[in-house]
Structure formats: C-alpha cells, structure tokens
Image: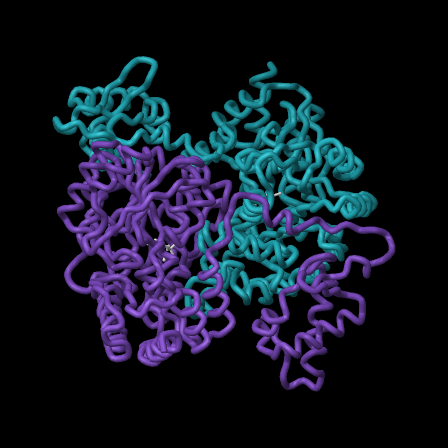
Chain colours: A cyan, B purple
C-alpha cells in the first residue's frame, strides 16, 4: 500500500494531499463519498494525525473536499464541472444484498495485523511460515510441469486431486469413498458457504457448538438461518441436546468440529460419537463434520471421524489443507452423497467457475509425494513444542489468573481469565502493546475467555508476546 | 472417472454391479436415494444399456436396490439391518437455498464434453491449449520461487498482483487507478456474483444486453433480480433504452460487455459510449462494464473502456485473464470505488477466504514479464486465423443458409440460420455427430441462432466440425 516517502524533500502533508487528489480524480473516492477519518488515515499511512489534518486543509482550500462537523470529510460534489453529474448512491448499494459484514473484533484484528506486520500474532488461525511445507511445495513446482491444459476445470474439482484424496481419506481418516463423491473447495470456508447457501433456506434452524468457529461467521446469519447452541464440555456436545433441539425447533442440520475443536480443543469422546450417530440416524438429521485439525494430533492418532462409520449417508464431511499445510493454498474438500455433490458443483459454477487448476495440481502432487508423511511428523512435533512454550509463558506471566485444558492437537489454546475484564478493552490494550489474540466472545462465549493460536507466531516471539499480553491485562485490573 | 475394465475376465455387468455396490456401501448413494437412470449410466460408463440392465438385476436380486416403474431405481431402505435408520431426505435439502440449477442446454453440453473428449468443441468459451501461454507459465513457475509465505491472503487479493494490474490497466486500457481500489477475483464470474449478491437486493431491477452472456447465468434469477432487456445491434445497446427502463422500472444497475460482446461480437460505437455515459451520470446509475475480450482485438486497439472516462465513479469495471491467457488460472479483477471494493472483499472472506496465492503470483509475474506482449501479438494473429477458417468452412458448407457479422475480436461468431429448426433438436443431432455448439436461446435469443466459438477447437478440427454441424442441420431440414 502507498506510504509517503520520508526521504523526499516534499513535505509529508503535501505528498498525502497529492495522493488523495489523485485517487479522487481516479474516482476511487467519487463525488459525495466519505473519506477515511483523520485518525484512520494517520494509522494507515504511519504519520501523525496533525499531518493528515494539514493535508485535508490543503484539499479543502482547493475545493476538492468538504468537512462538516459530525459527518466527516467528503469529496466535494460541485468541483467537477457545471453540468450536474450524479454519482450512484454507493452507500445505498453497499447496504444491499443479505451479506452481513464481518464481526468488528475480527475486522479490527485484521486491520491491525495488516498495518503493523511486527505485531505478535496469536490471532490468525494458521501455521507460521516455518511450519508450512514451503520448500516441499517449491520443489514440487520445479519438478513438475503443472500447466498441462488450464481450461475451465470441472466445477467439482480437478480429477487427479480427487483421486489422490480417495487414498488420503482411506489411509489417514478411515473414510471410504470414490472420486465421484468428493468435491474440491476453496477451503472448509467455501464448503460451509456452499452448504448454507444451497442446502438450507432462510428461516431454517441449525445447531452449532457453543463456543465455536461458526459464531465467528456472519455467513450463517446472512443466509437467514436460526442458530441454536449446543454447549460443549471437554468431551464435546451432549447428543441428547440435539434431540431436544430437534423436538423444539425442528433443526435441519448440525455443525460439529469433533476433533481438537476450534476454539476449545475439545475432542468428542467415542461414547458420545456413537450416541451422536444414533440420534442423527434416528432423526434423519444431517451432520456437517468439519475436520481440519485431525492430522495435527500430537500423540497417536485422532479418533476416527463420524464419516468413517456413516453407512447411512448422514454425514457431510469437510476437510482442508489450511491447518496441516498452508491456508494460502485454499484447498479443501467435501465428501457427501453423490446427489449433494452434484448439486453444489452445479451451483458453484455460477459463483466462481471452480478453482484454479494450479494449486489443485500442487496439492495432488503433495499428498502423493514422499514429502507428505515426514511433513506431518515434523508438524506435530513443532506444534506441540509451540504449545508447550505458550503454556509455560502463560503460567509464568499469569499464574492462577488463567486456566485452560491442555489441547492434544490443533492450533489453539482456549483460556479462561480470572480477572474479568471487557473483551474489547483488553484487545485494544494488547494491540497497543504489540500483540493480537481473539476475544472469546467472537466464538459466542462470555467476556473473560481468550483464544491464543500457538501455531502462527514465531517461536522466539511467544514469550515476549505473552509478557505483553500480561501487561495489557494488568493495565486493566490494577 | 471409473470405467469398467474391458481387458478383465470379469464380465462388464459384474464389474458395474460391484462398483455400484461399493458406492452404495460408502453411502455415496444412501438408502432411499435415486440411482442414475440406465441410459445415463450406460452413457457415463461407455457400455450398452443392456449391460447396465444386467448389473441392476444383479443388485436387485441381492436386495440392495429396488426399481419401481415410473420412479426409477432406488437404493433399498431395508437392507441395512433391522433397526430403523433414517437417512436425511437429501432431495428436500437439494431443493433448499435460492440457487437455481444451470440451464439444461449448458448442462447437456458439459456432460457431453466430459463424456466424450473427442467431441469437436465450438461451445466452450475459452482458448485452446495452443493459444494459451502454457510454456510461458511453466517457465515462470520454474524461474520463480512462488511460495514465499502462503498464509491467508488479504481477501482483496495479493498486493503484488494488484500493483502489476495498476500498470496493466493504465497501459492497455487507459484506466487510472491505485491498488487500493482493485480487487482480485476468481474470474469475471466471481465479480458478477459478488456484485449481484452484495450490492443488489431481491426484487431489484437491472438491465442486461439482449442477447448476452448474462442470460446464461441463472445467478441473476437466483439473486431474485428482475431482468430487463436492452436489445443490441451492431453498435451495441441504445442509450435511450436505458433511460426508458429507468423511468418505467427504476433499474438499479446496467450490465454491459461493450467490446466484442459475447455472443454477438458487437462493439459499442464511440457516439453511443458518450451517450451512455451522460445517461448514466444524469441518472446516477451504475454500469457494470464486463471487459474480457478487448486485448484480443484483431486489428488496431479496441475502443477505450467506459471506465477510462469515469471521473464520476459510475462504472464498476471487471476484467479477466480467462480469454487472453487461460481460464483455468481463475484470475479476474474489479476496479470500483474504494468503499465498494472494501465491502465486497469483506463479504468475500466469508465465501472462500480469498484466492489461492499461487495463481495470483503466477499472474503477477506473467503480466510484468517480457512474455506478455509477444503472447498477445501471437494470440491475436492465431485467433483471427481460426476465425477465418471457421467462416470459410461455414460459407462452404452452408452458403446462404447462414448469416453473420464478422467479429473483429473476441472468441465467438454469432450466426443466424435461415432454415429455422428447434434449438434442442439441432444440439442433439450435432452432439450425436461429434460436434458441440451453444444454441442462441441460452443467450436469450429466439431459436435459429447459434454461437460458434472458434478459439477452442483445434485448427485441424474446424473444417470437419462444421461439416458435421451442416449434416446435423440438414438432417432436420431435409
Ligand atoms: C473449524 C474450522 N472450520 C473451517 C475453517 C476455515 O478454514 P479454511 O477455509 O482455510 O479451510 C477454520 C479456520 O479457522 C476452522 O477453524
Ligand atoms: C462476457 C463474459 N463475462 C464473464 C465471463 C466469465 O469468465 P471468467 O469468470 O472466466 O473470467 C465470460 C465467460 O464466458 C464472458 O463471456
């Protein structure tokens, strides 16, 4: 993104005024539109607010912008010639459609991380560069000619990748299927999106875990679904709760993340899995099994997925490379009854015409390659190491002000804080001190919970990151 | 996809029965679900229908499937144990959501092409392998280390690609913008999807060209939009029609494809462009300018886009690599007022979490590279050559039974047939003879029009493909 040049002889405020004038002339900010606030621009450009104030004054004196107290700074409507031209009322358009904006906390975190790359990141739910198989992927890309054809791909996904996944699913997850019933998606995110958009209708009731990743997704509300909570403990949801919700609200679908749940790390016990299974098949109720973390299991293997016992076709299974290889690959998959896969692939063609062939080729090569199993072995050890480092740091800095259940896999540690402080204030204080985390309320829980991702921060940042977090917490409790 | 093994000693019907039994056991076809029809399965597997009938009989005798006349063949519900298990009513789910299925003609063409790769393809709107810069892309992938980080990308798109596009847009399309107001999408398709989903609401009226690519997209109806037609002639739409529609129906947006329009090849004249511009800015009406073909212009350069004159912010400009490089890259872009780009990027994060970084890196390298301009030069010559070959073949085979305006760019030739025959029958006859095209009604026109894509078929197939098409036509008129 553009930043003013501090070496230049031209004063910063003039550079900023010129830059904004240019963007206004390019109609990036059309007549009548709102400019970002002085505070926000100052943050984005890394300058003092007073510099932005000077730049705005310059543009105001040229008649390009107008400020009115209380309603911000807008591009002038009269500047551009005498004939009355009308810019569309873009604000009205931006309010169109049913898509709700992302949660304010998540937008704040995203903005903070993009503005300050030195922030210690316990917030992004993904692997650090040193845990991702970057060298392996680069090597595979050098070794193979990836660009056989590159036409519009089958919207259900690249066939060789689906074939590789047949073996992968059998070997690592005990799931039997054929390539006809696998669909490749842009990560689990797109699988969830397709399911909510194409299989459910506004007004339908669905059950989700509480807390859960799903709460962080306005997507469910955007689709007009009514959400009901399944409280979870260390062993996951209580199957009988599902029956209750079905009786009361005729829920149409259940969303579960059975292994190393995001954010709690909970693993559904094998007893409850069996009960879940009988409840679902008794009620003819589909379960969406979101399973991105199983292959991170620190010791032994993660429990078998519900899908591996599903002779009945109740489970829509979704998986992803994001948490075990690289989220920027954007490769996920869904295993579902054939008719459902067909339906989603058809709809998906209208959304994006399928995925790029190149990352699908890379992914197919990667899981078939000799790099894959050693990568997983290394990943498990390194994740466990980072988890331990995080836990030690928390114990040292916060002692009994913090409590948690140690996760046996996944990327996240879910903590309860004893001094109850407001979520938003804690996040602000932490960001100010150079560290980001996700407040628990994002996942539907009360204030006083936080999610730390240990996978993303650099190893050498973990200790100091937690020290900064502790300072932030203490600044609010002292 | 699985096919029976013709070398094997096991009879074909037994192989098929085993394969289906396996997929039923894997719950790809859950209890109660409908199997594909005998005819369809026979087509898919490349066997006689009688072989499928034998396989079904085998499965029926084992109690695995049940056939009832008139309602097809279903997986038996009682086979799987005595306790009553209930499979979700997947049919009901597949009818959920607002997503309409793709048009039957397009599904038929897609199925035919995937089942018979030897079909001569005048239907798919994309470049043949020999027109795509496959060697260049392979070379770039070998030369560059593409996997710097691979974390979740900015949902607005990879910044270096946006930066490359700033120069590209300026140089090739005369559009001035900065990377803050560019968004990278999964092709123009996703740009159109985001616009209809996030900026328009059910019931909104929009205007589209008639005929146009947009008619082929149930996406517009899925979003609940009311569509109004703008008839086009050789010089595009009539700007006054827009004013009329605005008065009558308060249209909220206009979708245009001003250069080498799909399917007609029409180019909006410069006089009409100016009128369009005044109407839009007088009414404060946004125009979506879909511009995938301009860089194919066979002679000279294509007219400047509306966006290049847009000091007012009325134009949402969308571009794509699909028609000038490779559709399987799935790289497109949108240039729009900043607030709109922000809004769409935020919503898009909930749909797919952004695009894979890898193809974005490839695309960024490609447009900056010395390969790009020579590729375009070659593409233009080769497309023109294929166009001429197609036209010669049509003249020879069909003489005055066919008429068209020779397109000066783009991938398509739009033809009117003098003997009026039903669209569907002509398509069936053509596919039976080994050639595919798109019936004009897909684009909203009456029977009697066809779209031939000259870019996709191999050069050596064009003549014989048109001969087959002529046979198909004559089989219906003789
Ligand atoms: C439980 C769960 N599901 C789905 C996702 C989406 O991941 P992706 O789309 O990258 O596969 C995440 C990411 O945080 C997750 O934690
Ligand atoms: C006019 C027009 N717009 C958009 C598209 C979608 O193309 P893509 O999503 O591959 O960029 C097409 C493809 O046929 C088209 O012809």
**Can you say which quadrant of the picture contains the N terminus of chain A?**
top left
**Where is residue B190 drawn, in percent x and y?**
41, 48
* Residue at (72, 34) in percent of width and height: A230
Quadrant of the displayed image that contains ligand 1:
top right
Residue B131 is at least partly visible in this image: yes
Instruction: Using the image as rendered, state which of residue A47 and residue B469 is in the foreground.
Output: B469
* Residue at (46, 62) in percent of width and height: A153
**Where is residue B248 drawn, in percent x and y?**
30, 34
**Can you say which quadrant of the picture contains the C terminus of chain A?**
top right
Q: As drawn, which residue projects farthest toward the right?
A: B82
**Where is residue B51 drawn, in percent x and y?**
66, 78
Name the quadrant containing residue A393: top right
* Residue at (49, 26) in percent of width and height: A433
Q: Is residue A168 above or below residue B54?
A: above
Name the quadrant containing residue B41: bottom right
Residue B133 is at least partly visible in this image: no
């Amino acid at each position: 993104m553009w930043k003013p040049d501090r070496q230049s002889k031209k004063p910063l405020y003039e550079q900023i005024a010129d830059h904004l004038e240019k963007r206004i002339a390019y109609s990036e900010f059309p007549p009548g539109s709102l400019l970002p606030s002085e505070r926000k621009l100052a943050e984005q450009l890394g300058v003092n607010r007073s510099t932005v104030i000077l730049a705005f004054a310059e543009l105001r004196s040229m008649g390009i912008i107008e400020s009115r107290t209380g309603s911000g700074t807008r591009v002038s409507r009269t500047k551009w010639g005498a004939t009355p031209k009308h810019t569309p009322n873009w604000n009205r358009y931006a309010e169109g459609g049913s898509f709700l904006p992302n949660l304010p906390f998540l937008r704040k975190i995203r903005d903070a991380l993009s503005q300050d790359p030195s922030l210690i990141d316990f917030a992004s739910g993904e692997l650090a560069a040193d845990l991702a198989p970057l060298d392996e992927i680069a090597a595979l890309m050098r070794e193979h000619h990836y660009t056989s054809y590159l036409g519009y791909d089958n919207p259900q996904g690249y066939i060789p990748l689906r074939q590789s996944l047949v073996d992968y699913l059998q070997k690592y997850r005990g799931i039997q299927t054929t390539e006809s019933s696998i669909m490749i998606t842009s990560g689990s995110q797109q699988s969830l999106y397709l399911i909510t958009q194409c299989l459910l209708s506004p007004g339908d009731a669905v059950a989700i875990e509480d807390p859960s990743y799903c709460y962080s997704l306005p997507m469910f509300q955007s689709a007009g679904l009514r959400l009901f909570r399944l409280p979870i403990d260390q062993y996951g949801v209580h199957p009988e709760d599902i029956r209750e919700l079905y009786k009361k609200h005729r829920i149409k679908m259940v969303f579960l993340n059975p292994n190393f749940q995001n954010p709690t790390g909970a693993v559904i016990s094998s007893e409850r899995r069996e009960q879940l299974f009988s409840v679902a098949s008794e009620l003819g109720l589909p379960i969406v099994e979101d399973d991105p973390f199983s292959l991170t299991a620190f010791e032994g293997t993660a429990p078998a997925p519900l899908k591996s016992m599903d002779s009945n076709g109740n489970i829509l299974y979704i998986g992803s490379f994001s948490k075990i290889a690289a989220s920027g690959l954007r490769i996920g998959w869904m295993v579902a009854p054939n008719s459902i896969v067909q339906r989603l692939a058809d709809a998906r063609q209208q959304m994006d015409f399928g995925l790029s062939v190149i990352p699908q080729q890379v992914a197919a090569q990667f899981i078939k390659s000799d790099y894959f199993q050693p990568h997983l072995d290394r990943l498990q050890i390194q994740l466990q190491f980072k988890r331990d480092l995080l836990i030690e740091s928390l114990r040292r800095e916060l002692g009994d002000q913090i409590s948690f259940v140690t996760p046996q896999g996944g990327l996240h540690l879910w903590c309860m804080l004893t001094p109850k402080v407001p979520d938003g204030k804690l996040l602000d204080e932490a960001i100010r001190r150079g560290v980001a985390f996700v407040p628990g309320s994002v996942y539907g829980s009360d204030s006083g919970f936080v999610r730390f991702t240990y996978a993303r921060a650099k190893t050498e940042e973990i200790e100091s990151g937690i020290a900064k977090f502790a300072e932030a917490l203490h600044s609010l409790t002292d």
